[in-house]
Amino acid sequence: MEGFGLMSKREGAGNVDKFELKLDQAARAAWLSYVGGRTQDEIASQLGVSRPGVQRLLALARQEGLVKVHIDHPLTNCMVMSDAILKRFGLEFCDVVPADPEAAESSAHYLAVAGAERLARLIERSEPLTLSLGTGRSIRATVEALSRIERPQHRFVSLVGNVARDGSANRYDGVMVLADKTGGERFLLPAPVVAGSVEEKEAMLGQRLFQAIVEVAKDAEAAYIGVGRIDRQATLFQDHFISEAELDELLWRQAVGELLGWPLDRNGTVIECSITRRVTSLPLTMFRDQTLVALAGGRDKGPAILAALRGGWLKGLITDESAAGYILENEI
Amino acid sequence: MEGFGLMSKREGAGNVDKFELKLDQAARAAWLSYVGGRTQDEIASQLGVSRPGVQRLLALARQEGLVKVHIDHPLTNCMVMSDAILKRFGLEFCDVVPADPEAAESSAHYLAVAGAERLARLIERSEPLTLSLGTGRSIRATVEALSRIERPQHRFVSLVGNVARDGSANRYDGVMVLADKTGGERFLLPAPVVAGSVEEKEAMLGQRLFQAIVEVAKDAEAAYIGVGRIDRQATLFQDHFISEAELDELLWRQAVGELLGWPLDRNGTVIECSITRRVTSLPLTMFRDQTLVALAGGRDKGPAILAALRGGWLKGLITDESAAGYILENEI
DNA sequence: CTCGTGTTCGATCATTTGATCGATGAATGA
DNA sequence: TCATTCATCGATCAAATGATCGAACACGAG
């Protein structure tokens, strides 16, 4: 809307001159306002124009890029990236925590604290809340970073089966911890992430208990989940939720990441394959009208996070500088 | 209330840590506000604090110097110097025009335009105005830069005798031009700047005409005057208002400048000497409750302007970058 | 354990800022 | 020369900001 009037001026010598004079005034006004901290009324009387005139000069100065603001703090970079990602993928929020180049550990901790902060804002309210959680180290660390608070009216649902193929329980489920800390109700999916066969999956989905839990999850306002890589370091594989052959199949089909066990290609589309047909997690499309928040960091997770963003699955992202850097390098 | 989970980080130095966290938040708030252009309400909900909380964060960020503002324009330097001089000498205003290193001429022109702008602000108004003027190239150029405006109700008085020792009229008197341009009344001092003898001065001061003009000058709201150097290039000397011997006496007494013909030492004190006793101009003390404005530029005039400032004679100054530079280098 | 002290927080109000709209004045073309 | 159009300017109002004040909280001493 603004600014186009300026460029359309005929390029006579007189006009340029006049414009230059205006810029001079604008620079003076900007200096007095931003550096000198004067009020617009003072500037008006000092420059001999009306207050709205000063207003216009300041607007001009900003528009012409005369005013450069720099925040002298390490977090500046994080804010820049956070904002860029927010805008690029239309998120509701995006937190980027600093990545300490010295200690990779601390970055994970920052991530947990940032996640805990967001979670705390939800949980602290007293109206009953239904919240669903994925699994993973990040989610687990996040709920552990939360402090104890009495909220027995809340309900927490696990979105991912917490039984591995070999029968062991999921080490990284956050629902138990969260329910312990708040006194809220807990709902766990009594199933493996990936069923042994399509029939097994069908059987589980048919169970009344399973259905009941799905109903609770549909009620959830927000879902906090991790983002999984698909490679030999993938948690899904390392913790025996899928076999080596299944991993190879995913790699062959160019999966780069997974959300709740659903493999994504680099554009964030869920890959149809033998594994997909056996995943017991709730379908991603269920979250279209929920606040789905991903929590993951580290440059290695970059491709996976980027895929999740491209798919448009997420409403919120909590990540670190390394991953944010990867995302922006590869998407802009 | 907010962020209750975060402070629970156990660390050795609890206080420092807390402050660091606050600075982090402050940096985030500052970035969102100054760079992102977000409103404080948005920032408040984004950071999970109340709006007054954001207020405090922003105040902290500014106080800790996290926020650096730079105005990307040649005039920035002028504004910085203008402000410094204004504050140091308690002026009501101080305009510093840029000195083009290429063309020394243009600087003089800028000065005239800046002076004309100030003058125009006074003259524009319709209530009757009494204004007094000194002499000098700068003053003359300034009134010439003014545009024509019908103000017959105004009165303009010359503060300096406009007759040289040899009987010729002062070339640089602005009153005639100004009166012509506005149609206002004109009052000239029918006297040389420096009388031939004390007796001659006394005789002139006794004249009824002279007295009448002094009365008008006392009515003036503002006085615009030049600043004279005291050296072999001094206008006072070059235009034969004083003789070479008199110039030597002034130099010997360490005069560095003059206002209205009154010689000043480097601290701005009027020098008592044979010349002072014969100066017919109105005494400087008369301007204590008027707006005395000096108009002069060029590094060579620096010492003279600085003396005038140190003497506390001025309420306003219009100068250029070179002179302002000299002043600040030698006074701070 | 209780009181005093100092600090911090959020509700409220005054000031400042940004935006809209009608009026005024200058440039353009008939 | 006059009418038309466009840009610019300042009055007015809504929004945002900064500041003050009382209350709550934590901490330390008695």
Image (cartoon, coloured by chain):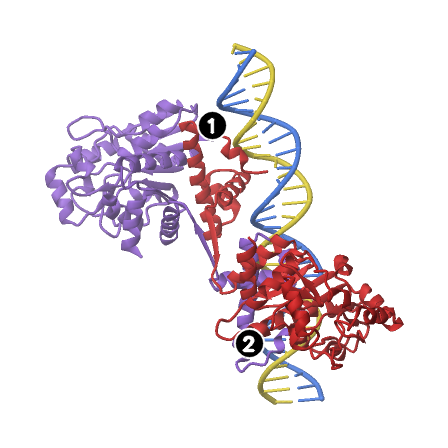
Chain colours: A red, B purple, C blue, D yellow
Q: Chain ID for label 2?
A: A
> In the figure, B132 relative to B58: above or below?
above
Horizontal side, residue B289 vs residue C12: left or right: left
Q: Quadrant of the C terminus of chain B?
A: bottom left
- Report the Cα–Cα distance between label 2 and label 1: 60 Å
Kind of residue at disc 1: Arg
Q: Position of residue B305 (x, y in %)?
A: 28, 46
Residue pointed to by mark 1:
A10
| Residues indicated by labels 2 and 1 sit on the same polypeptide chain | yes
Horizontal side, residue A118 vs residue A53: left or right: right
Residue pointed to by mark 2:
A105
Cβ–Cβ under 8 Å for marks 2 and 1: no
Q: Position of residue A140 (x, y in %)?
A: 67, 75
Q: Dot 2 lies on which element?
A: helix
Q: Of the two numbered discs 2 and 1 on the same chain, state the one appearing first in sequence.
A: 1
Q: Is residue A207 visible?
A: yes
Q: Quadrant of the N terminus of chain B?
A: bottom right
Q: Position of residue A149 (x, y in %)?
A: 73, 76
